[in-house]
Amino acid sequence: MGDRLFFPSGLLGLGAVAMSLILTLIGPRATGPLPDGFITPVMAFEFAESAAEVTTLFEPEGSAAAMDRVNRWDFLFMTLYSLFLVTFALAAALDSGQFTLWFAAALAPLILLADVMENVQLLNLTAQLSLGGGMEPALARLHLFTWLKWGGLAVYFLLLIPYFRRLDSRWRLVRLAAALPALAVGVALISRGLANELLALAVGLMFLLLTIYAMVSGSVDQ
């Protein structure tokens, strides 16, 4: 059963990777100055800490609308990647019999919930730009749900380490990459900015590696 799940998991992973590229293309072309250390507007917005940062970020006309477009399409992306994470963990659990992988499968829907709530706050914040309302409550909720999402992803990948450690092939090295998101989370909690960007990069690397592994494993077992 685990063998048969890897291939559809890989297809979901491909869909999530493709959707992430689409989100990059439809994002805002210009924004205001980003906080120190940040490189991408999306990460700067997700980890915004004040109303001033949000207002500065969306100073250029049309930038807030473009970010809203990204965050609305992001609901499709998060659905794809969450289904990918669930099916991958289930496939690995059935393949190996490792109990911790069932925890990983159960964690994926919680990550999805945190991501949904994060997006709700992001859309609320851009709405406040025109409504002139206070941003502090939404920013507090954003801080909570953003860290639940990224922290949840880091924990998910840590739960995969025993699975890849047992492999005899080159895939055994994936266990090293699986530890990178947790390391980036630790650094970002101390000093935000570049570490947050590296966190996103480490998570993206894991999505790519898991997708390739699922496609290869699923194709071999067809």
Image (spheres, grey):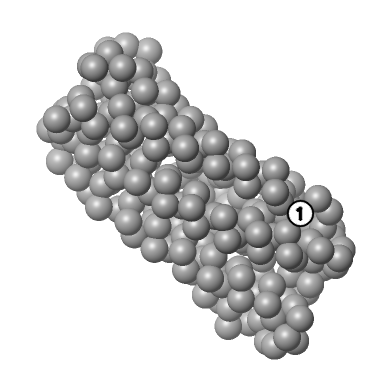
| Residue for point 25% across, 52% down | 106
Height in image: 71 above or below 135? above
Counting the numbered discs, the total is 1
Quadrant occupied by the N terminus: top left
* Residue 1 appears in view: yes
User: x, y percentage for residue 34?
Assistant: 79, 57
Farthest right residue?
60
User: x, y percentage for residue 20?
Assistant: 57, 42
| Figure quadrant of residue 149 | bottom left
| Figure quadrant of residue 123 | bottom right
| Residue for point 58% across, 83% down | 137
| Figure quadrant of residue 200 | top right
Drawn side of residue 65 relative to residue 80, left or right: right
Which sits in the foreground, 106 or 24?
Answer: 24
Drawn side of residue 191 relative to residue 119, left or right: right
Drawn side of residue 222 relative to residue 146, left or right: left
Q: Amino acid at mark 1?
A: Pro
User: x, y percentage for residue 30?
Assistant: 84, 54
| Residue for point 35% across, 43% down | 85
Which sits in the foreground, 130 or 59?
Answer: 130
Drawn side of residue 82 relative to residue 131, left or right: left
Neighbor class of circle 1 (other Cα within 10 Å; few <14, some 14-19, many 20+) is: many
| Residue for point 33% across, 51% down | 108
| Residue pointed to by mark 1 | 28
Height in image: 54 above or below 94? below
Which sits in the foreground, 92 or 219?
Answer: 219
Quadrant occupied by the C terminus: top left
Secondary structure at badge 1 equals loop
User: x, y percentage for residue 96?
Assistant: 16, 28
* Residue 147 appears in view: no
